[in-house]
Amino acid sequence: MGLVSARAEGYYSVFQLEESALQKTRLLFSHKDLVIVADGVDVDGYDRNVIADFTRPDGSLKEIPAQRKKLEAILRYVVRDFEPGNRDTEKQVNKILSRYHEDTASSRRELVGTKLMARERGGGEYWKLEIPG
């Protein structure tokens, strides 16, 4: 029906909805139908593949990915070690991050930059942000 297009990006295929075709067929699907279809999509599959490629058996990182999309998958993996609602000192954050990689400063910066964590002005305390969805 021409609703989806695909292109290669490295080792992965990137799929995209074709909005013009979707507009023509929007009356075919109710919101309820779309939710049911979306429930069957494995949105975490990409993250699992990236994590498998970049981690050692102990969970630490072999390296920090250079590609932004892969880095974000790794950051989502790392941030799971932080408890929602906790406010951690920089020293506590570094202790957790050092389990993954020795460059804790870059990891902290990236977690804040991608809005997975926030920090108090001046870097005194850090906390995990809730991810919508």
Image (tube, helix red, strand yellow):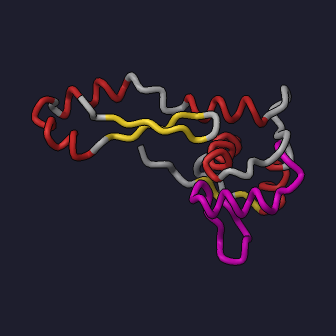
Q: Where residue 61 sits: x, y (%)?
A: 82, 40
Most extreme residue toward the bottom is: 122
Q: What's the magenta region?
A: 100-126
Report the front residue among 60 and 9: 9
Q: Which quadrant of the figure contains the C terminus?
A: top left
Q: Is residue 82 visible?
A: no
Residue 129 belongs to magenta span: no
Q: Where residue 68 sits: x, y (%)?
A: 64, 53
> Which residue is pictured at 66% across the width and 57% down the height?
111
Report the front residue among 20 and 26: 20
> Which residue is pictured at 57% across the width and 59% down the height?
115
Most extreme residue toward the left is: 27
Q: Quadrant of residue 106?
A: bottom right
Q: Which quadrant of the figure contains the N terminus?
A: top left
Report the front residue among 27 and 60: 27
> Which residue is pictured at 59% across the width and 47% down the height?
84
Q: Where residue 41 sits: x, y (%)?
A: 42, 26
Q: Is residue 26 left or right of residue 72?
A: left
Most extreme residue toward the right is: 102
